[in-house]
Amino acid sequence: MKKVTIYALSTCLWCRKTKKYFEEKKIPFEAVDYDKQDEEKQKAMTAEMKAAGFNCSFPFVRIDGECTQGFDPAEFDRMLDGK
């Protein structure tokens, strides 16, 4: 099973939709709410997103080593299938 990590904002509608997508597919994931982290963790999360070639917007989804931003079920499916 691929490792799924979601960086989200606790108040973001698209972040909630992203979490719900993985829940409905019964795909385990780790969700980290950016706005509930301390400043040091937020800096690390921002650096990770920038290193992956993305700006700091949410949701940010990492499936194994591949990343995307935004709520995009077709992209999530592609990443999960490894194509």
Image: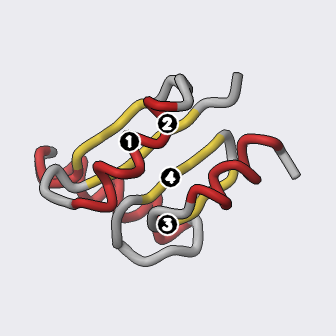
Q: CA distance from mark 4 to mark 3?
A: 6 Å
The residue to which callout 3 is attached is: 69
**Residue drawn at 35 percent across, 72 percent down:** 56
The residue to which callout 2 is attached is: 22
The residue to which callout 4 is attached is: 61
Q: Amino acid at mark 4?
A: Val
> Where residue 48 appears, x then y in whole percent?
46, 58
The residue to which callout 1 is attached is: 19
> Mark 4 vs mark 2: which is more N-terminal?
2
Q: Amino acid at mark 2?
A: Phe
In this rendering, the label closer to the viewer, 3 or 1: 1
- Disc 1 to disc 2: CB gap under 8 Å: yes
Q: CA distance from mark 2 to mark 3?
A: 15 Å
**Residue drawn at 16 percent across, 50 percent down:** 10
Q: CA distance from mark 4 to mark 1?
A: 10 Å
**Element at badge 2?**
helix
